[in-house]
Amino acid sequence: MPASVAPPHAQVGEDVRGIVAGAVMVALTERLHDTALRIRLKSVDVKSREGVAQNLEGIGEYVSATQKDWTSFRFSTRYVPGEGSATYPVLDFGQPAATFSRVLNDPVLIGELETRVCDQIAKDSGVRDVRLQFDDIQTERNPDGSLDISADARADVGVDTGRKTHIEGSYDERGRRWINVNYLFNIPDRLTGGR
């Protein structure tokens, strides 16, 4: 079933904002290695729907105990009302190009990312047969040593073939673990705030 675009500025309720805030807090704490953060969500909008799932985007701010100024960031996540939980959000700090470096794609990590995304799509869509065809893959290393992998792909989901899909994954090289993996259908460049 194709994703349906939500009406402009479709806001979520306070209960959903609370769930999303919790997921964002976990992601920020892990990404910034700071357990004393305070956050506030300025907006949480429904950008599209995928069956019962809602693709959410928003703008938030965080401040640490050692800072006075709030720092803005964008986030995107997927929320399934029946489950009352949000996926690990993709965070975009709008960092200038100088703060990360492009590196070669690691075939092993790309394979793991493909498996994780296929499993997630299969779970979300309720189908068993999911295949991905990558069109473009880029890997960047952050100052903290983590890798951000973004990819455009086409997904075959059961009989629904060739769906444009944007994929984001963050991998902690030191901890040898995936920090987050996320995908969105039919929303070009949404996860990076349209930049």
Image (tube, grey):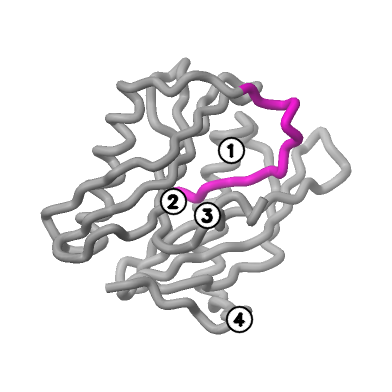
**In front of the other: 121 or 177:** 121
Residue 133: x %, y % from top left: 29, 44
SS at badge 4: strand
Above-or-below relation of 147 to 25: above
- Give the residues in magenta: 88-101
Q: Amino acid at mark 2?
A: His
Q: What's the mark number on residue 142?
A: none
Residue 77: x %, y % from top left: 48, 57
Residue 33: x %, y % from top left: 61, 29
Q: Quadrant of residue 11?
A: bottom right
Q: What's the mark number on residue 166?
A: 2
Residue sitting at the far right = 68
Q: Which residue is pictured at 27% across the width and 73% down the height?
A: 1
Q: Amino acid at mark 1?
A: Thr
For disc 3, the marked residue is: 22
For disc 4, the marked residue is: 8
Residue mark closest to the camera, 1 vs 4: 4
For disc 1, the marked residue is: 29
Q: How far apart, in angstroms, are the residues tagged by discs 2 and 3?
A: 24 Å
Residue mark closest to the camera, 2 vs 1: 2
